[in-house]
Amino acid sequence: MTAPTIILVEDDPPLRMLTTRALQEQGYVVRSAATAPELWIALDNGPADLVVLDIMLPGTNGIDLCRQIRRTSDIPIIFISARGSEEERVLGLELGADDFLPKPFGTRELIARIRAVLRRGAAGDMGRGENGRNEVEFNGWSVSFSRRELRSPTGAIVDLTGAEFDLLATFLGQPQRVIGRERLIEMSRTRLGDSSDRSIDVLVSRLRRKLSAAGGSPPIVTVRGVGYMFSAEVSRA
Amino acid sequence: MMRWPSVGLLGRIFVILLVVLATEFAASTFLFERASHFALQDDDARRMAEHLVVARRILDRTVPKDRTGVTEEVSTDGFKIVWLPKGLSSKASYELNGLRSQMIEMQPELLAAKLRLHLQPLHSGTAITGTMDLSDGTLLKFDTTQAHAAWSVTLGWLMALFAPPLALVIVGGLMIRTTLKPLNTLIRATKHVGTDGHEQVPERGSAEVRSLIHAFNEMHARIHRLIMNRTQALVAVGHDLRTPLARLHLRLDNAELDMETKYAMEQDIDELRSLLQSLQDYLSGEGGGQPQQRLDLAAMAMTIVDNARDEGKDAYYIGPSSVDVVARPVAMRRAIANLVDNALHYGGNVRVILQAMDAEVKIAIEDDGPGIPDEQLEEVLQPFIRLDGARTRNTSGMGLGLAIVSNAVRAEQGELKLERHAGGGLRATITLPLR
């Protein structure tokens, strides 16, 4: 397998150079660009696996660029932001970016994010791939994968921790099928930045509590000795 | 000196109008009206006296059998005269000696006629009645309603005198109120100087008020510009520092340093990053620009608490599983997270207690730390205030955490209260209206 190709768009020359070097040291092929026109040239120069895009650029900003890229391509995008605000993050993810990294960042963090996004793309995991950025519904609840957002039947935003959302996404990917505990534990271990040692049962009970908001019984059923099953019918919105 | 409660400009002008008109009224009443009133009474008495003398002379010369007819002829509408052949004398309640001597003085003949005057009880319908003797010893009785009119007029008179000035005061007051109205608008606008909105007050009203409003609008625009400039400068600083900081971080990763130094430097960069983050969050009023949305406050609180627990912190959530409120999600999440972070940092633990009531929802964030001295509870809400001796403790942020919370809560028409709870630690309570 050839090394993944990354297009880096960053207007600050020293930072562009440093980031390029850091990525190359990790074995990636890097094509760098300082402005929007250079990005289009870099995209035309051959296949690429991922775009690392600074939001603040002279001329066309990263948000607009992201919108333009998404019209023609599904290439994974990681935003780099000098503001790091939640609003910007949500907007970026909504536009179809795959991750969001505030400045300053270290090599380790950058590489970890790139790996995670590339892996997700390859695995066709929830949030990308076949289910893409669609929204799904169950029992009046709706889930937006691009915004990583859950809404109750009353339309209220229901916050979930990262691990809870990933667990819900896994359930939604395989509704009305029993999922083994080992499989769930493994899944929660591979989650990015998830280093804590919590049991899957705690996660399930937290998720159940939040999903009981509508009054009815939560749609996660324990299958004794095997694992869990998401009992509700899931439909695409 | 004693301080009277202020009645406001309008009240003062009202009082001034009233005092002026009351003085005018008093002066005219007591100096002029009263004199003419007396003269009128005097006139009245003279007319009565003359009438009585003439009537007596006529009746004296009339034979008794014709007297009844003659009395009718000498009577007028307001002055009834009756001849009583028998010596009947009506017992009356009040003798009017003053008027009697006044009349006798005018017509001494009335003394010989033994004039008696009485003030009649009201139900009999007349005010003054009287009798006097004719020369043959029979009685002449008379009632006057005219005199009564002269007396009773005084009340209506007072009313008539009072009404125009009173009407003037009311009309004047209403006009002044209209004149002062632009000032009230100005006062309301003054309260919003320095907050988000930047609205010009319409220039209306009198020339002075208009120029005052104009000056105010200019001042407001100037202040707004100053705040904007400062904010933009600080945002730019925060923003521009991040790129060199990112360079520093990447260079550090390549630098050949021992692990310990590298780690310490990474910590320094991280601290700088969080300083910039809180500065940018505060200045941009993070999430404040977003629209309000329905959100589950309980799920939000649980998520923040669970994230802290997953990091091994002593964090608990007590409350219902679901409480829907309408708020700005990003700003509210940040507010609760800041209070939880503060509690964990200064108190070492945190309890988030959510209570939903009929019209409002209370979310209390408590810790068992040392708390904040009462006299400093106000102060900590101010931006850039940190109570621990600044750099002696490992605190991240710039002392903007609570100021961010305060702004976020105010944007939802909520309330933020800081207090020492019974256990001694700090309790921060956010009260939000339920809609």
Image (spheres, coloured by chain):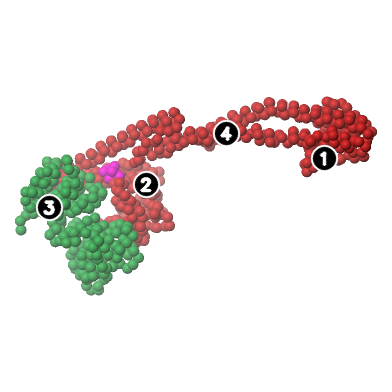
Residue B343 at x, y percent in the picture: 32, 52
Q: CA distance from mark 3 to mark 2?
A: 42 Å
The residue at the point 37 percent across, 47 percent down is B410
Q: Earlier in the sequence, mark 2 or mark 4?
A: 4
**Viewer-nearest residue: B46 or A70:** B46
> Which residue bears the numbered disc 3?
A50
**Viewer-nearest residue: B239 or B207:** B207
Q: CA distance from mark 1 to mark 3?
A: 117 Å
Left or right of residue B50: residue A219: left
Which dot, 2 or 1, sits closer to the camera? 1
Which dot, 4 or 3, sits closer to the camera? 4
Q: Amino acid at mark 3?
A: Leu
> Which residue bears the numbered disc 2?
B410
Badge 2: residue crowd in 10 Å (few <14, some 14–19, many ≥20): some
Please give the range of residues in magenta. Answer: B279-285
Return the chain for callout 4.
Answer: B
Q: Earlier in the sequence, mark 4 or mark 1?
A: 1
In the image, residue A186 sits, relative to residue A20, either above or below, namely below
Q: Quadrant of residue B124?
A: top right
> Which residue bears the numbered disc 4?
B169
Q: Amino acid at mark 4?
A: Val
Give the chain ID for the red colour.
Answer: B
> Which residue bears the numbered disc 1?
B93
Residue B352 at x, y percent in the picture: 34, 56
